[in-house]
Amino acid sequence: MKYTIGMDFGSDSVRALLVNTSTGEDLATAVHYYARWKEGKYCDPSKNKFRQHPLDYIGGIENTIDSIVSQVDENIIKNIVGIGVDTTGSTPVAVDKTGRPLALLNGFEENPNAMFVLWKDHTGIKEADEINELCSKWAIDYSKYEGGIYSSEWFWSKILHVSRTDKKVLEAAYSWVEHCDWIPFLLTGGTDVSKLKRSRCAAGHKALWHESFGGLPPNDFFVELDPILDGLTNRLYKETYTSDVSVGTISKAWSQRLGLPITVEVAVGAFDCHMGAVGAKIEPYYLTKVMGTSTCDILVTPKRKEEHLVKGICGQVNGSVIPGMLGLEAGQSAFGDIYAWYKNLLKWPIEELIASSFILDRVTKEKLIDEALENLIPKLSEGASKETIGASGELALDWMNGRRTPDANQNLKGVISGINLGSTSPKVFRALVEASCFGAKKIADRFINEGIPIKGVIAIGGISQKSPFIMQMMSDVLNMPIKVVKSEQACALGAAIFGAVAAKTYQDTFEAMTAMGSAYEKVYEPIPTNVDQYQMVYEKYSELAISMENYMMKLI
């Protein structure tokens, strides 16, 4: 028996999973919540500024792997052969020549610009606009394989913004590294950033890399963008690697630190949604939706003889999901985050009223607050499910964190319209859920209208498993069946699958995915009467979206 570990670095936490490579069975799992992130450090949500300290990631590695190793016997531990890693993205960090993030160096420990710039950081909106303008007039449109619209969520927008706003970081930064590239580099004891194996997934979808360009755009492109980028491409990369490739074996120091065999192979990293699709046993032309704080929608297709570029998505990259197949990515900048925002909006009076009670003791107050907040979304879902589709008039737009796809525009803001004196919390919540489902339909429609068929939908993530209300609505709005993946850790499972291939337990990703991938626990079928009613509301959503986007862009 051989075993692998999958590590899934999300927005709030890292999850580790120990998997039997013969069956895909979970033997142990552990979760670590980022301490600094939980305290809200280094972030300013009002400015869409989100940074994470590398020490949160290091602590996550240690705590989760220590935990899963402690849950199994020595015979299993000595037969762990591989580690796979997925992360959010684009989440880059400035590093020195050794590949060490600047936040780990003296003088930069508390500097947010020296930390990882999280995927949902939108401080580079201006820089993204400049990149788009330059791409549109350059001889080669370097954004064409990334949907034709470069986003502030992506690699170069963030690098340029930080470089412009922090001279100390600009001068100290030798190179920049994606989170999914840094973790494998760290675990294998890397000390030379020029030898770091870069992810095809990250480079192709977020950094303007493509084989036909010979790698990244040339230096003169970036000099034209801003002279402060002069020479940076020489300190980055030309080659990229798919996640079936091994970065190397775990270093002696990390082997001892984690209690793992020195022979463990570490796979090239990738983004969470791409590995989640592998954990879900993605099939060609099935839309795999990773439904968390945001959504990431993944499709794979056979490579075509004639190139066909889909407009307004997050790129199409050879091997970004499954080596040898074309991976297409789209997604919504906010999904679960919308529901979390509404929950936070309502929790303030709950906390204040209970906390101000003179009758209850502190322990009772805390218990009541926790119970109320835990039941808030389920109660809202219950109330919202009783409302007639489209009857009360509330209508929302799901742009609380801008719009990722189709047609990235992070200048956009969320909208709740049609409020009247009869509007209630469940009615508004229903409008928010409808908006998030309508945003998903916009993505599906774009693929279909661009000639990419969708045979069905596969859903991953906590929302897909915990909220029948949201999932049934999603099925009705898309008018497609949705298969819900059984594994609660599909992304980590996908990472473990790549760990098995990198360790040569399997010959290729398809073979490993077939043996180790998750089964499905439920299928949601669209309800015909609901489909027709949601289509009418969707048309209103589309009209509101057009008018509000025009209005918002005039305000910029």
Image (cartoon, rainbow, N blue to C red):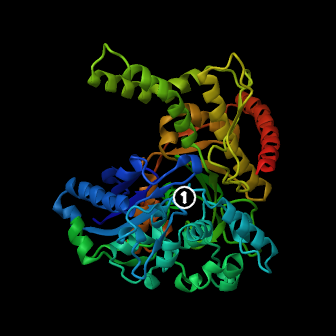
- Rendered view: 69 above or below 206: above
> Image check: 288 left or right of 372?
right
Residue 303 pos. (x, y %): 67, 72
Q: Which residue is found at the position 76% from the left and 51% from the top?
A: 556
Number of other residues with Cα within 10 Å of mark 1, as a class: few under 14, some 14 to 19, many 20 or more: many
Q: Nearer the viewer, residue 306 or 430?
A: 430
Q: Nearer the viewer, residue 160 or 156?
A: 160
Residue 345 pos. (x, y %): 54, 31
- Rendered view: 117 above or below 382: below
Q: Nearer the viewer, residue 153 or 301?
A: 153
Q: Which residue is found at the position 43% from the left and 24% from the top?
A: 352
Residue 85 pos. (x, y %): 42, 65
Quadrant the N terminus occupies: bottom left
Residue bearing the label numbered 1: 119
Q: Which residue is found at the position 76% from the left and 32% from the top?
A: 537
Query: How many numbered circles are shown?
Result: 1
Q: Is residue 21 visible?
A: no
Q: Nearer the viewer, residue 315 or 497?
A: 315
- Rendered view: 305 above or below 545: below
Helix, strand or loop at label 1? It is: loop
> Image check: 49 left or right of 143?
left
> Image check: 396 left or right of 170?
right
